[in-house]
Image: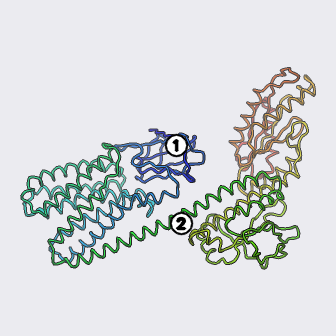
Amino acid sequence: MWYRVTLPAGDWQDPVLYILSIDLIVQVWLDGENIYQYGTFDKDGRGKFEGWPWHKITLPEGYENKTLYFRVFSDYTDIGLWGEVSLMDHSELILHILNNSLEALLVAGFSLLVALLALILSLLQSGRKTFTSIALFSLASSVMLLSESSASQLIVPDALMWDYLAAGSYFLLPVGLWLMLDQWLGGTRPPRAISVIWKLHLVYMLGALGLALTGVIGLSFTFPPFDALLLLSLFLMGLITVPRIRLMTKEQQVLVLACGVFSALLVADMAVAHGFMQWVQVPVGLGLLVFILAVVIISLRHYGMTQRALQELTVTLEQQVAERTEKTERLLQREKARAKVLAFENEKSREFAEVVAELQACANLDQAFQVLTEAMPRLCSPIKGMIYRRMACGGYERLALWGYGSALPDLHPVIETLEHMPPPVRLLAGSVEEAEAACRNCQGLVCFSINVEFMNHGTAPESLLLLDAEGISNSGHTEGGAARLMSSINLVVERIGVTLSGLSLKEDLHRFSYEDALTGLKNRRYFDQLFEHEASVALRKELPLSLLLVDIDHFKQFNDTHGHEAGDAALKAFAAILESRFRGSDVVCRYGGEEFVVILPASDIVGARERAEQLREAVRKETVVFEDKDLGFLTISIGVASWPGSTKKPEKLLKLADEMLYKAKAGGRNRVEAFPER
């Protein structure tokens, strides 16, 4: 089933779409692109259950007011988006999840401590089974609350594992509940049905989980039968306990009332889960807390001999809850500091994007370094620093200095040798761990090398960016923030180096470039030099490389019939079609006369042949007009060869494409022939 929603506009810097749950698997599409997927769809659009996680869908730039499509499959009792759906900044998501899960985590922690307490008392009071059932119920409650909380995925990001834990603990709840009632209502002679019911629930839990783990049925299919069984058992519980309410003690009445409140909340949560009620956050945890508190208080009254020990454990429990609350507050403070770092990074990312755009628009490296000289003080603020550029003699000249005021640094404007310079920081892209180590060791100035790749002499440190280490630490707000900031600066420097390398290559290629005077395309000499370079790149990066050799059919006859001026017009028209049909990374050249050649980097034989067929069809549909006279249309023959599909050596592509061109012309022209793959 498909769902759609129009995304609103907002001032989010890093927007994500948060969805509490989806039944069962989903694909998310925006502008025809699959931007998110959970689960695996088969060829029939179906799939198997893989858990009920919360979903974080990162939205690309320009998403505002666009339609987001959800492709959902479910063979469960419900289908579609379930629960909370919110649009927020990525930096707010963790805080949002922690805030939503805080109550459940606290109650789960409380339930776990109660379970431990009851287990200890059951060992001390071996003749009493009440504490054993309390421990079982509390432990199941704690595991269920933790597993169903959104924060569980932050602990271990395995949704299916948590769903199995949630199912096991959920299926175990009525076992503990009926055991407690069987023991607490023992004085009123409860019927044997109570014992039968909790044993039936225990058998169902073991059977359902066993069948799900062995793959006989999906885990999601075990919930509806259990919910029906639970409703039936709760109904029987009411039939058993209500007629005996007057015969019970006050403590037993309190227990039955607390159990009734908890059961009502369970039924309400069940109705929401199956779509019988509109989604709302049912406070099952609070009901569970009330019920457990009632059981604990009554248990304390029944076992006065352990009252002092229980009081001490209660104090310990309060201390642990306070410690968890304090840890949670520290986590919130750390997330706030992290949010500040993210805001700082976002601001600098925007400025950096503008600088990169300016660099890409430069004609050469000298112009690019003029842009860097003006942009670096703004880009690095408030961190003080300086930037140097390598001179022809091998030394480095300072281009810009910022943030020092009247207290100038010790480094000279011109450095003949790098012996007294700090060694450049060497980090893997995005490696915050290495950045943390670098932050601990750096003092004074931190050096980042801007490496530029040149066609003639390889990669060299063309520029050095030196930043104040203390400024990095202060701008990062925390030690972790400083490491993240250093890692981001390293990525920025690498991106600048890549951009400058592109400009360097552009300059080198410009020296080799020649244009055909008639068509405006590059000529054969340009092709010979560039093809050698592209072949080397393909070998080094192990990317495919394809070649199209194109010849205009019967062009001599066209010239003889319509004249050479008309022939020139036909060549210009064909050149215009060539330029319009290929990507910016493709290279189109006039090889000679009516022959043309096209270099297709990163294109395999299948893609190259498809592009050739598209070109052939496009030429056949265009007529040649000369002096307002329609001279008819041209046809072309094309030979196609590709590395590594057609040959082990990319330098043989031209020879193979020429053979295929000859085959196309011999086969009747107006054809595409591709050299078969090895």
Q: Nearer the viewer, residue 329 or 212?
A: 329
Q: Looking at the image, which residue is at 71% across and 46% down?
A: 603
Q: Looking at the image, which residue is at 68% across and 54% down?
A: 353
251 left or right of 611 in image: left
Q: Nearer the viewer, residue 118 or 354?
A: 354
The residue under label 1 is: 7
Residue 637: which disc? none
Within-10-Å neighbours for mark 1: few <14, some 14–19, many 20+? some
Q: Secondary structure at mark 1?
A: loop
Q: Secondary structure at mark 2?
A: helix
The residue under label 2 is: 337
Expressed as whole percent of the image width and height from the top left, the position of residue 140 reads 29, 62
Expressed as whole percent of the image width and height from the top left, the position of residue 290 reads 24, 61
Expressed as whole percent of the image width and height from the top left, the position of residue 511 reads 88, 52
Q: Are marks 2 and 1 in contact (CB under 8 Å)?
A: no
Marks 2/1: CA–CA distance: 29 Å
User: From what the image shows, is residue 632 above or below residue 120?
Assistant: above
475 left or right of 246 in image: right
